[in-house]
Amino acid sequence: MTTKLSALQRWVDEVAARTQPETIHWCTGSDDEYQQLVDLMVEDGTLSPLNQETYPNCYLHLSDPTDVARVEHLTYVCTEEPDDAGPNNNWMSPADGHARVDALFDGAMQGRTMYVIPYCMGPITSPYSRCGVEITDSPYVVVNMKLMTRMGSAALERIERDGKFVRGLHSTGDLDPERRFIMHFPDELYIKSIGSGYGGNALLGKKCHALRIASWQARSEGWMAEHMLIMGIENPEGETHYIACAFPSACGKTNLAMLIPPHSMPGWKIHTLGDDIAWLHFDDDGCLRAINPESGYFGVVPGTNEETNKNAYDMITRDTIFTNVARTEDNEPWWEGKADGKPAYDWRGQPYDPSQGKAAHPNSRFTVAATNNPSYSELADAPEGVPISAIVFGGRRKRLAPLVYEARDWKHGVLVGASAGSETTAAAIGEVGVIRRDPMAMKPFCGYNFGDYWRHWLSLEERSDKLPKIFHVNWFRQDDDGNFLWPGFGENLRVLKWIIDRCEDRVGARETPIGYLPEPDDIDTAELDISAETMRVLSSVDLDRWRIENAHFATYLDSFGERVPQELRDEHERVASELDKAS
Ligand code: SAT
Ligand code: MN
């Protein structure tokens, strides 16, 4: 196969000339193609079949032990002006960026097959969708892209119609961390990634395209590309509200998106639209609508069980690719937090020895098509997307943030998102558990200067009088002994109910310097083993800690210099003075 789109054909020829593959394979996206690639990888050891009786069509991939997470320090945004990438990104000039990686791509695919993957982020017929083509020498990337995106012939037809596509060039290279780069050239809608086969570094449709490049495109075209799950919440009366929630990697977006309502909330239903990325556009009525550009999940495995996320637990018993989990004697996948079985081999493929660390890597992942999810929404393929009632920010905060609070208005909501922080997780290489600022959960993913990004958020207020309300949640508060105060998981629906009641003006709230908080009794705790005192702690504001937090954020804002919108500084000062007054 080839293409009638000359710009695409030319690019493929040019890449082939540089990387010198043995053959070129244009991906059709068919099930047969998927199976052939899986068989090929089973033959060469890239994949191992798991127990086909209990885990039909499930396979295990063990990556190089140095290649198990995103590498933020090797991820660059290449713009002419360093300030356009901003202090939130590593910067290189486009000329240097190309030169740096092109040298590594020279001859990189010798003796290998080069796969050309046309893909569409979002429903094929949606005006909000955007397309890309990834060229890779990794069949593992191809099968993951098949599970995660709408890829193959239908996407190619749309690309040929649109004439426009994001280019993503990937090679696993030699996996040497010294020769690993993830480069973005937003002006050219071009991504070049080499030296890693891992998820966010290699599946270029995901973070590289759908967040870094798309956030750049979104600013110039007047929409938003955000690190948000999308879910529908249906109450017993049959009324459904859609919300979009931004939490950092490995903070429970997948679990929340496919939550199972607790026993005390009969008649409630959850509909999953997406678990990681939302593209938000205004419709003609000024209503903000969301589509999920992806069509599959790349979720964290450890901790997944029938209690925490039964939908995910069930959906990954078939048709799933596991990456870096452990294995039992019966060849079933195993991970920390799985209720049954025990590990025989660890994520490096070695006989399990507890003194060598965890059996499954803390960032081990499942890749599975969204259609496997029992709570998958019927509207996930709707070209017009779903209307968003609330935007919810959050993160892991042991001490500071209350269970839930609501921003006073849009401007304050932008500040709430911009000042979000979270403890780091195993989703990226680096220290785990330290607080870092993570505005809108986009720290690793915003493809341009955060100052300009906040300005873009603020500007939306002029576009509509139907903007969603903005909230902040924290499922991760702990007591002095490190016990979680809130049970989390399915019980989080109790908090979402309060959020929806606020959107519908059905419940009051208490005004505080940080925003509106529920009265402790306004969150229903029926059938929960939680004391009134704990609820009081969860719904109170520690003014001293908040003043320290606010001062810390001021310093952070300063690091963006003149790019910080004055409106955001003013809003920050307003909150600071409210905090001073209240203390
Ligand atoms: O590796 S990914 O970026 O795809 C997953 C994540 O970190 O959110
Ligand atoms: Mn993510």
Image (cartoon, rainbow, N blue to C red):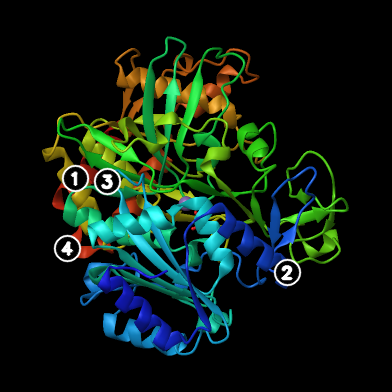
Q: Which residue is mark 1?
A: 458
Q: Residue furthest top?
A: 237
Q: Which residue is mark 2?
A: 43
Residue at 68% x, 63% y: name it. 39
Q: Is residue 410 visible?
A: yes
Residue type pointed to by label 1 = Leu
Looking at the image, is mark 4 or mark 1 nearer the viewer? 1
**Rendered location of residue 551, percent (x, y):** 33, 51
Decide if residue 77 is on the left or right side of residue 204.
Answer: left
Residue type pointed to by label 3 = Tyr
Image quarter where the C terminus lies is top left
Labelled disc at residue 132: none
Alpha carbon of mark 2 to alpha carbon of mark 3: how far?
40 Å
Q: Nearer the viewer, residue 1 or 396?
A: 1
Residue type pointed to by label 4 = Glu
Say what secondary structure mark 4 lies in. helix
Q: Which residue is mark 3?
A: 128
Residue at 28% x, 64% y: name it. 559
**Rendered location of residue 93, percent (x, y):** 27, 81
